[in-house]
Amino acid sequence: MTRPSRAAVLLFAAALVAAPAWSAGTEQAAPAVDPAVLARIRDAALSSDWAYQRLSDLTDKIGPRLSGSPQAEAAVTQVAAALQAAGLSVTLQPAKVPHWVRGEEQAELVDYPGRPEGLTQQLRLTTLGGSVATPKKGITAPVLVVHSFDDLKAHAAEAKGRIVLFDKAFDQDLASNGQAMAAYIQAVAYRVQGASAAARVGAVAALIRSVGGADFRLPHTGVMRYEDDVPKIPTAALTAEDAMLVGRLAAQGPVSLHLTLTPQTLPDADSYNVLADLPGSDKPDEVVLVSGHLDSWDLAQGAIDDGAGVTAAMGAVQLLKSLGLQAHRTIRVVAWMNEENGSGGSKAYFAANKDKLAQQIAVIESDSGAGKPLGVIASVTPDSLAKLAPVTAALQPIGATALERRDGEVGADIAPLQEAGVPGFAPMVDTREYFFYHHTAADTLDKVKPEYLRRQVATMAVLAYYLAQMPEPLARVQAEK
Ligand SMILES: [Zn+2]
């Protein structure tokens, strides 16, 4: 059985008196974590806008927060101050991060079948994070449109000297049916690997169709990676509409583009994860981590990616502190730096804790937006799942009752800890419209419904408290092979 903390006894004396006392002789053991406390946490979350206020500060007062930028540094300062003011014990954990800066970006159709004399057409695009630049005056080259890596291989002989366009549509039907991450993974391969695949067959630049499910003619940025053994060529994402336009024209005959991209990669910068602890009452060295990432892309405020996630995590721990609750174990907020383009923060945390991984009891990350919370995703052993029933029972009044076990990573920043066997969690939220706005200029505060953010705080606070208060930690997870 478990012993409530002193604070919990004081606050919830009435509830505890009403609950049946456990003893060896009674037929039913009292729950290991008091359901009345979990209900109290949930209800308090639903009446607090602390997280939404922090999200407003982060988005409206600072804006885009790409790693290495002055805005990212301002976010570190702002969030650390807010957590300090909430009475938590704050640490800045140093992390080296890439420093990539967007430049000019222009694409123009300069030749195509049926082009009226003297006319050109501007395309909408965004440079992919990490891309090298074209020459200042740009490049002009014929376009090769392909629909997959296999298609590129089949047309490899035609790629030399051309701009390859990967016209791969995002499967919004899949996303609309609750499989947004599967849709993302299918399409994002071209964003990450497209440039090197195109360079390998002699292309001079690579374009992709934006990885997103809406038809707002918005380009979606995101990270790309160069392989070491091929030349680095410039790369950008066209809007889905403009990729389709190029595809239609290319089906009629030769198409040429003028492309200008002038991003810069500066030396790596010094930055920080923000850590804030609510110390455990009697197992303070054991840590339950609740987190989101502080950095964002540079096109918008990063409200859904991942302002909502990081402020929900902050709100969960602020809430427990404000209720005077102290679990057996320490609950630690982490506002990760550099999830988007390098995972410098994640690597720094893992390096700092690699000799005490046994003390990392559970890790939670929210990085799937601010849709309606539906429950909890748990990367735990099959036997552990039933032990989480009190969490979804407490969330029943807000409908966040789904409990889904998944193998493998459930958050990019917590992935190294999960690989080391630490049970990993993420709030399950409605992601059907997440990829409408993801990594676009439209990822702004108005996309976040305050009520859903409150519910996400409720979900993360109940889950974090429960994991920190369970008498025995959940079993470690064997790495998937
Ligand atoms: Zn994110």
Image (cartoon, rainbow, N blue to C red):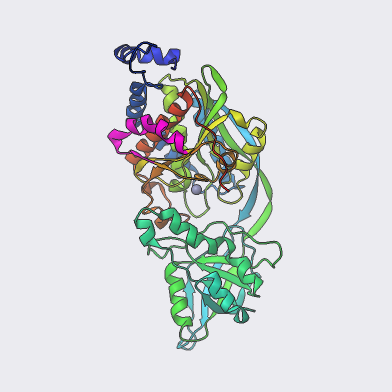
Front residue of 462/389: it is 389
Quarter residue 169 falls in? bottom left
> Residue at left 37%, top 32%?
389
Considering depth in this image, is 422 or 90 the residue closer to the camera? Answer: 422
Q: Quadrant of residue 142?
A: bottom right
- Reply yes or no: does residue 449 show up in magenta: no
Establish if 284 lies above or below 315.
Answer: above
Q: Quadrant of the N terminus?
A: top left
On screen, residue 201 above or below 36: below
In the rendered image, residue 410, in percent from the top left (x then y), is placed at: 49, 44
* Residue 436 visible within the image: yes
Taking the magenta stretch, the answer to whether it contains residue 394 is yes
Q: Quadrant of residue 28?
A: top left
Residue 30 picture location, percent across and down: 36, 18
- The span picked out in magenta is 382-403
Q: Is residue 127 visible in this depiction of the protein?
A: no
Residue 289 locus on image (x, y percent) = 52, 32
